[in-house]
Image: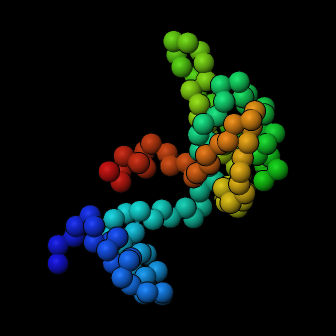
Amino acid sequence: MKYSLLRPFVNRIFTPGKEQQQLVQRNQNEFGMVKTNAGQSAILLRFVSWISGKEQIEQHFSRFGKIKETLMFYDRVTGMHRGFAVVHFVSPQSAAQAIQHKPHIIDNKLLAVTYHTPPEIRRKTN
């Protein structure tokens, strides 16, 4: 049977209980939607306020564990913060705790926190 974009959604509607969960998991694996994050110790912060500084981010996330480094990215022309940052923890457990604990609010702005995938790895998977 050929895959269509609607197949996963149609199957979810008509499949009850545990079968539905297994089907969703299988579809996610087939379409590459599941990430394996075992051993990852870096998180990506999106929607960071332009007034937020490196110290504020480190202070907020240091409660989850020791931070190895924090990277913030700036526009070359304007010098303004681009709205995202990467926090590298010493241990993967600290990164997992930071992702599980929500919400993250710094300078009255809600941050989106996910695992960070380095560009080298992203290029290999595409």
Describe residue 15's horizontal placement relative to residue 106 as left or right: left
Image: 52 above or below 61 = above
Describe residue 36's horizontal placement relative to residue 66 as left or right: left
Q: Which of the 4 image quadrants contains residue 56?
A: top right
Residue sticking out furthest to the front: 13
- Camera-side residue of 16 and 30: 16
Describe residue 76's horizontal placement relative to residue 86 as left or right: left
Q: Residue at x 62, y 42 (%)?
A: 45
Image: 82 above or below 120 = above
Image: 18 above or below 54 = below
Q: Position of residue 48 (x, y in %)?
A: 64, 34
Q: Position of residue 106 (x, y in %)?
A: 74, 37
Q: Position of residue 118 (x, y in %)?
A: 49, 45
- Camera-side residue of 107 and 35: 107
Residue sticking out furthest to the top: 77
Residue 67 visible to an observer of this rendering:
no
Q: Residue at x 61, y 24 (%)?
A: 81
Q: Position of residue 1 (x, y in %)?
A: 17, 78
Residue sticking out furthest to the left: 1
Q: Residue at x 48, y 62 (%)?
A: 35
Image: 7 above or below 83 = below
Q: Which of the 4 image quadrants contains residue 78?
A: top right
